[in-house]
Image (spheres, grey):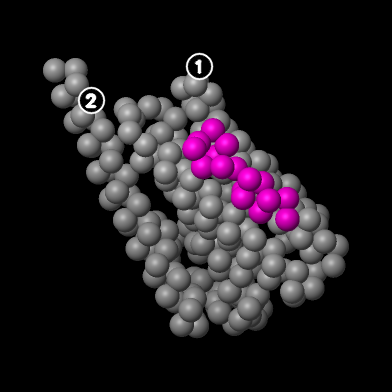
């Protein structure tokens, strides 16, 4: 029963993450689109909290971060002033960092590799991309010229472009149409690329070790 619950929550989290990424590609850059993205992102946050609450890590920090971030986000949509935008991205960065640590601790628990852990691996990979996406937006709010987008006349890069940049950097594809130009932005982008490489290496090593332990136990 516990395994079925883990499977279900991991699957829902992964599907919501994929839905958020696909939805962000088709919504126009308008205020109503921002509201829709906010609602979809908080659906992800709620499922992530439920996932964390099943772990040994207490969910109260995540609940507090989510409630505070939701209030700040709603106020920011109604009154988009810079201090509120900075606070919003800071809170989202803190939350995604918290969930990343909690899910990684779940993957590191002893025991066989079950379907829930495999889906959690994929979900955590996407959450890492959203973590750096929030950090990039925070950087841009603090230093508006931190990124440059090729072919765009705007002085700031859109959140959608930063999400795209985060995912391409995490996977080390590095297409180059969005470029970090300040030293903090470049260093964080480099750290994200390193994180993506090490995450894949650690995950593969963990899976191989788990299957070897399973084979020795069955022999």
- Number of labels in the image equals 2
Q: Which residue of the protein is positioned furthest toward the left in this rendering?
A: 219
Q: Is residue 15 visible?
A: no
Q: Which mark is residue 54?
A: none
Mark earlier in primary sequence (1, 2): 1
- What residue do we see at 42% from left, 45% from top? 104
Percent across and percent down for residue 95 are: 59, 54
Q: Is residue 162 above or below residue 51?
A: below
Residue 145 picture quarter? bottom right
Q: Secondary structure at mark 1?
A: loop
Residue displayed at 28% across by 50% down = 201
Q: Give the magenta part as a residue range.
A: 52-68
Looking at the image, is 218 positioned above or below residue 184?
above
- Residue corresponding to mark 2: 214
Question: Residue at image x 49%, y 76%?
Answer: 185
The residue to which callout 1 is attached is 1
| Left or right: 99 in relation to 28 | left
Q: Left or right: where does residue 130 sit relative to residue 33?
A: left
Quadrant of image for the C terminus: top left
Does 50 lie within the magenta span? no
Residue 2: tell me if it is visible. Answer: yes
155 sits left or right of 107 in the view: right
């Amino acid at each position: 029963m516990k395994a079925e619950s883990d499977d279900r929550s991991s699957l829902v989290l992964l599907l919501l993450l994929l839905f958020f990424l696909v939805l962000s590609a088709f919504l126009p850059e308008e205020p109503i689109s921002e509201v829709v993205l906010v609602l979809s992102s908080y659906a992800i946050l709620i499922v992530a909290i439920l996932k964390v609450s099943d772990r040994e890590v207490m969910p109260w920090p995540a609940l507090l971060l989510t409630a505070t971030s939701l209030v700040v986000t709603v106020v920011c949509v109604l009154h988009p002033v810079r201090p509120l935008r900075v606070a919003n991205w800071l809170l989202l960065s803190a939350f995604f960092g918290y969930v990343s640590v909690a899910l990684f601790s779940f993957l590191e628990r002893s025991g066989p590799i079950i379907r829930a852990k495999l889906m959690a691996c994929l979900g955590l990979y996407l959450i890492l991309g959203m973590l750096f996406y929030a950090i990039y937006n925070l950087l841009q709010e603090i230093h508006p010229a931190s990124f440059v987008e090729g072919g765009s006349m705007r002085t700031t890069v859109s959140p959608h472009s930063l999400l795209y940049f985060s995912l391409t950097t995490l996977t080390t594809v590095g297409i180059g149409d969005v470029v970090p130009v300040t030293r903090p932005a470049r260093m964080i982008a480099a750290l994200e690329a390193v994180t993506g490489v090490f995450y894949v290496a650690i995950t593969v090593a963990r899976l191989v070790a788990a299957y070897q332990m399973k084979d020795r136990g069955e022999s």
